[in-house]
Amino acid sequence: MNSSHDPLYGKRVVVIGFARQGKALARWLPTIGANVVVSDSKTAGELNLNPEDYPDVEFVLGSQRVATLKNADLVLVSGGVPLTLPIIKGAIRRGIPLANDAQLFLERCPAPVLGITGSAGKTTTTSLTGSILNAASYKTWVGGNIGEVLLDVLPNIHPSDFVAMELSSFQLELMTVSPDFACITNITPNHLDRHGTMEAYTRAKANIFLHQKEPEQVVILNRDDAISRELAGEVRAQLAWFSLYEMIPDGAFLAGNRFILSGLCSSDRKPHVVGDRSEVNLRGEHNLANVLAACALASAAGVKSDVLFEAVRAFRGVPHRLEIVRTLDGITYVNDSIATAPERVAAALRSFDEPLILLLGGRDKKLPWDEMLALALEKSRQIIVFGEVGPLVMKAARKLKADPASISQVATLDAALVKAVSVAHPGDMVLLSPGGTSYDAYVDFAARGEHFRALVNAL
């Protein structure tokens, strides 16, 4: 792209937060001729930053000062940055537009984008969608909230390519543009510590399709999810569904053990069997829903039905999502660090019939724990709680009148694994499915999962 033609050429752009997304913006914005200022409350030392590595960027570090906004044309907010920060409130008061890296990418991407969001399942669905598109011989870029920072590869993307893009509610709440193909896997209570109410959280998720303007654009929603059904009336583009339990005239559904595509998601608009449940190498009913969502999305984008299940058969899941780390002395260790909400833990628990030693922990997102914990007490031989959320979970266990011998609390993940090894028997599954975010001890869920993996491999 000729930088002189970019709308941000010569504009003063303030980037709030210098984590993964902030770094990508600091690399990319100078290439299109923007005047870039990065603001972060951490010092250069705390960020392990040498400002000389970014010669075209001005850094304001150590505190976030509203004065940094002087003459700003745009403020870009990194995903984990709360919108309640004084500097962001200051931008809103001054009428300075807010956006983020995902918005900038979607506005400039020359290729069709398949955007996926949801309270659970979006990472698996995005990864599988990318695998299906690759199997169909399309050059495919997978990124967004996972994988590649898409702004980094934007110059290499061509109109004939496809992009499978995971979008979080944190990104979507600021966005005024939607992808050509949009999918919501489900909407259940999550990130209420950030959004405050379910209504605000739902509105953020709905942004993935609310800004679609063309009739040929497509939205895929979960027919089995109550909130997703309620959103259907707001869809302006073509609407298709996926369902584990209903026959769908436009979309993807499970009939017995058979995966069927129909209508909008079928090349001749007739129902077609594309695969069998026995061919899916992922545990749990929730993953069958993820397969349906990915198949509906990819087929709506033009992938032929005979190609879809080639990718599904080969797909073994994503790291940190019900990932089997190893089996040692008859005990299997499973990394589900991506489960950062109690509902995700419940889905994991339903995926196992084996005796479980469950490791719960992390930081609370102001979500209800009681229902999941009742299931965990039923399905687990032992529950070990670690991290900031420990006292809250133990209080919930007492409320449920749990046997004190069935649940214990330790300080760290390291200690939780030591305890698990001491009580596990051959045939048991030691499952890290925390239910809380990683931010009490790790930079993200992946870092927590990698630590667990390292601990297990060192046994």
Image: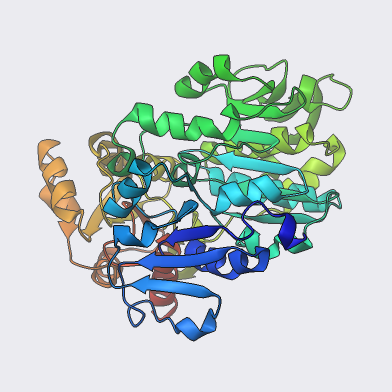
For residue 6, above or below residue 213: below
Residue at the (48%, 46%) spot, across then down: 171
For residue 368, above or below residue 153: above
Q: Where in the figure is residue 442, as x and y percent of width and height? A: 34, 67
- Image quarter of residue 113: top right
Q: Where in the figure is residue 334, as x and y percent of width and height? A: 45, 60
Residue at the (25%, 49%) spot, across then down: 364
Residue at the (50%, 52%) spot, across then down: 73
Q: Where in the figure is residue 177, as x and y percent of width and height? A: 60, 37
Residue 330 visible somewhere in the drawing: no
Query: Count the marks: how many?
Result: 0
User: Quick one: 364 or 145, which is closer to the camera?
Assistant: 145
User: Quick one: 172 or 333, which is closer to the camera?
Assistant: 172
- Image quarter of residue 413: bottom left
For residue 443, above or below residue 285: below
Which quadrant of the rendered structure holds the N terminus?
bottom right
Residue at the (10%, 42%) spot, across then down: 398
Q: Where in the figure is residue 71, as x and y percent of width and height? A: 44, 56
